[in-house]
Amino acid sequence: DNPSDYIQRDMEGSDSDTRRRASKDLIRGMCKQYEEKTTQICSEYVAKLLQQYSLNPHQQWRAKDAALQLVLAVSVKSMSQNFGVSETNKYIDIMEIFSTKVLPEISMANVNALPFIRADSIKFIAVFRNQFSIEQMKSLLPPLISHLRSEHAVVATYAAIGIEKLLLVKDKRPGSNEKTYRFGKNDVQPFLEDLFKGLFQVLDNADMPDNAYVMKAIMRCLNTAQETIVPVSTIVLGKTVAYLNKICGNPSNPRFNHYLFESIAILVSKVCQTENVVIDTFESNLFPPFQQILVQDVIEFAPYVFQILAQLLELRPGSGTPGMGFSAPYTALFPPLLSPVLWERKGNVPALVRLLQAYLRKDATWLANENRIPPILGIFQKLLASRATEEYAFSLLGTVFITMSPQQLDSYVRDLFNLILNRLQAKKDLKIVRFMTLFMSVIACKYDANFLHSCLDRVQKDILFMLIKQVWLPAFDEKMILSNQEKKIFAVGMTKLATETSSPVLSQDPSLFAMLVRAILIVVAPEIEEAKIMQLNNGLIVESDKEEDEVSFDSTFSKLQFASTGIDNDPVPEIKDPNQFLARSLAHLGSLYPAKYSASLTSCLSKEQYVVLQGFLTQAGVAFQ
């Protein structure tokens, strides 16, 4: 009677209070202790049930339903909801059962017959997806696509779930721990037209409105297809925009909403990056519903809208001439983005910051000419005042310094650093220290050590040296969490502080040289025993494959994983390897001042650190005199 309830109980395992679930748990427990004997007894029952079904399938469908459920109970030894079965019962031939009892069912032309058996068969495929070869997976796509046309909402939804699960399967590359999808874009490309036609047909089924399972399947198909989606992108974009218009007035299913926006983000990413001439088409389709969302103040959708607007702006080709400005829609959008009401909602902050960063990267000169920088810095001040948003404050300010010239920044520098140092003085903890020192590293990377010194001198003369000794360097003896990009910025920034001939460190406090080199090695060589830097993936602790992270969202801010364009706050994209940069910078310094600084390293570095440094020098083909 309730398709959603049935699917949650049967497919997601929310049937803990049922007799069927209790029976399956009992059998699995018995298999742990008496696997061979339990398997033998259960196999006899399965055979009897299947024989009973074969005599009259339409009357005895419950027999096969029970048989397939019994097979699942006795066959699975280890599995997870995300990754399927990883270990099976060695006394059960899963592929033989599949070939003789499951495949014939889903190969029947009448997709509306025996709906419970069809659902069980598709569930079997989804559960044992890891056991199929790529050839078997390819052969399963056509019958699964056919079942998307079933008049039974559960069967059609199961078909969508089965397709989505097959596309998730990964294999390790030979000789590597890296995993790649078993199903690639070229494998799915021949089926795209029928696939999306069927998925959208299920989505239109009134028996299951806002079907999150199907929208997730659409998202997964788009991600698998990559740029091969271009030929059908117009149809897919039109349908997703139609669903977006439909739910704007009454957002009721957060999971459906999230997968819908992820799907739009994939379309923008794959199609616009492949053919950027279509960005205008995407904007003309997306701006009306986005405008409706913002005007009607649909709080749940605003962060999604700001992320996709940022994505579109980042992908839009620039004019090539600084100061030319933006197209009319983006120009009109900018003033409302500075509204205090938007920034009061913490869920908006990450997305709004990214959108402002996109404006800055695209044309900071126009923003400066239009006197838009003071309100942006006012937003920085507001974000800095709260521990919950200070990370985004420094991220925004870093982009301001990366995209603008020292002359454009000159009138703001003293007040900005006053705010930062006052915030540090108010509450000095590792979190604020990390954000502040990373921001200072950005300045050193983008410009030089002398410019950073001059900025801080506006507040207090030579305060840079005190900050390095008492705040900056001690932080690396703590358990600091850094992403790979943050490591690079810290390493390059400190390398410039330590080795540039114009650096005030060398001219006024050379004792800091070896201490900075030691800190750099702690950052770039975490394998050293005394290092305490935790290696993370893009700043996030990740315990599962990336594709599962996009399903996580909350009531405040939900990051769209597929809205990333790869554009970030890297002040030195030309430097690819910070280790090589350190080695060459030391070699250059040593060539100018032989033996002046190298001796200090032997007393400051541990034996392990010194060996690592020598390795960097050898790899770069240089020496530090």
Image (cartoon, helix red, strand yellow):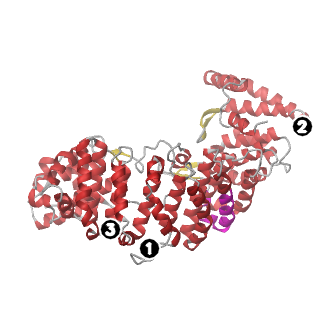
Please provide the residue range marked out in magenta. Answer: 224-242
Residue type at the position of mark 3? Met
Residue 495 in the figure: left or right of residue 67: left
Q: How many marks?
A: 3
Front of the two marks 2 and 1? 1
Residue type at the position of mark 2? His
Q: Which residue is mark 2?
A: 58
Query: Front-most of 304 and 58?
Result: 304
Please report the residue visible at 61 percent of the width from the left and 21 percent of the height from the top: 33
Ranked by sequence position, the earlier of labels 2 and 1 is 2
Rendered location of residue 241, percent (x, y): 65, 60
Q: Which residue is mark 3?
A: 404
Residue 151 in the figure: left or right of residue 244: right
Magenta span includes 235: yes
Rendered location of residue 420, percent (x, y): 26, 51
Magenta span includes 271: no
Query: Front-most of 165 and 418?
Result: 418
Q: State the predominant SS element of the stretch in magenta.
A: helix
Front of the two marks 3 and 1? 1
Please report the residue visible at 53 percent of the width from the left and 44 percent of the height from the top: 553
Front of the two marks 3 and 2? 3
Q: Quadrant of residue 2?
A: top right
Rendered location of residue 499, percent (x, y): 18, 61
Q: Report if the CB atoms under discs 3 and 2 are less than 8 Å apart.
A: no
Label 2: few (<14), some (14–19) or many (≥20) C-alpha neighbours in 10 Å: few
